[in-house]
Image (tube, helix red, strand yellow):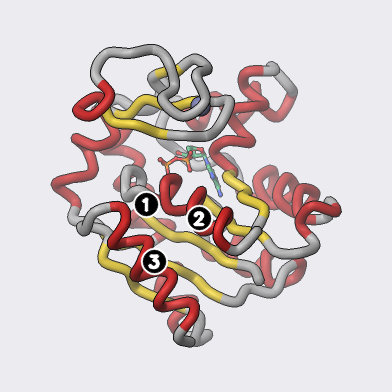
Amino acid sequence: MNIILLGAPGSGKGTQATRIAEKYSLTHISTGDIFRENIKNQTGLGIIAKTYIDEGHLVPDDLTIRMVEERLSRPDCANGVLLDGFPRTISQAEALEKFAKIDYVINLEVSADRIVKRVIGRRSCLACGGTFHIDFIGDTKVCPTCGKELYHRADDNEETVTERLAVYNAQTRPLADFYLGKGLLVNIDGDKDIEDIFGDIVKAVEND
Ligand code: ADP
Ligand code: ZN
């Protein structure tokens, strides 16, 4: 089974992605995490990607598509993947159709006013991919899940978030209609709490 998770920055996409991947034994592929790993290791891809990510813009389609196609060709993807952050444009979605068959597209819908606050207070762990909000974890630098170091993403500031939301509305939101037309879209209310959202996703997938 292959699942796409769609949702604005700060929609809680990463949190749900981890849970869905675990429940259905899918390999969790987060393009944002892959880019951040490349930035940390200063690879050629990372150096290019950073210039876009720091501005809140999308990394160009050709680079992103090639990266995902390569990642999906590896053996750990054969039994199914959970795509988190890809596709983000119609061109990426069209390219994906050539190298993967998608079973569900879960669209996490969150009201816009919550998003900026969530993202600015977000702290991330590169080691386990976890994200946490300072309202819940306080000022710690230690990941509550794995004990490694937490960090504040360079693009999780008010200015960049506003730009990322604009990019989401212009380039990524149209994917909901694209997948609705293919009969793959599942809309989920992302304003509920984490467990309820996850329950709704499981219901939608299992009652299909
Ligand atoms: P969020 O969903 O919180 O914005 P991600 O970790 O998914 O964060 O992505 C962070 C950044 O990485 C994006 O703002 C964008 O610059 C880049 N990125 C991630 N996925 C893609 C993609 N599919 N296409 C282009 N750029 C991407
Ligand atoms: Zn961690």
Q: Amino acid at mark 3?
A: Asn
Q: Secondary structure at mark 1?
A: helix
Q: Which residue is mark 3?
A: 107
CB of mark 2 within 8 Å of CB of mark 3?
A: no
Q: Which residue is mark 2?
A: 88
Labels 2 and 1: the sequence-earlier one: 2
Q: Residues within 10 Å of mark 1 (few under 14, many from 20)?
A: many
Q: Going 29% across and 25% down the picture, which residue do you hit?
A: 157
Q: Nearer the viewer, mark 2 or mark 3?
A: 3
Q: Is mark 1 within 8 Å of ligand 1?
A: yes
Q: Secondary structure at mark 3?
A: strand
Labels 2 and 3: the sequence-earlier one: 2
Q: Position of residue 82 (x, y in %)?
A: 59, 58
Per the model, the C-alpha gap separating discs 2 and 3 is 12 Å
Q: Amino acid at mark 2?
A: Arg
Q: Residues within 10 Å of mark 2 (few under 14, many from 20)?
A: many
Residue 154 lies in quadrant: top left
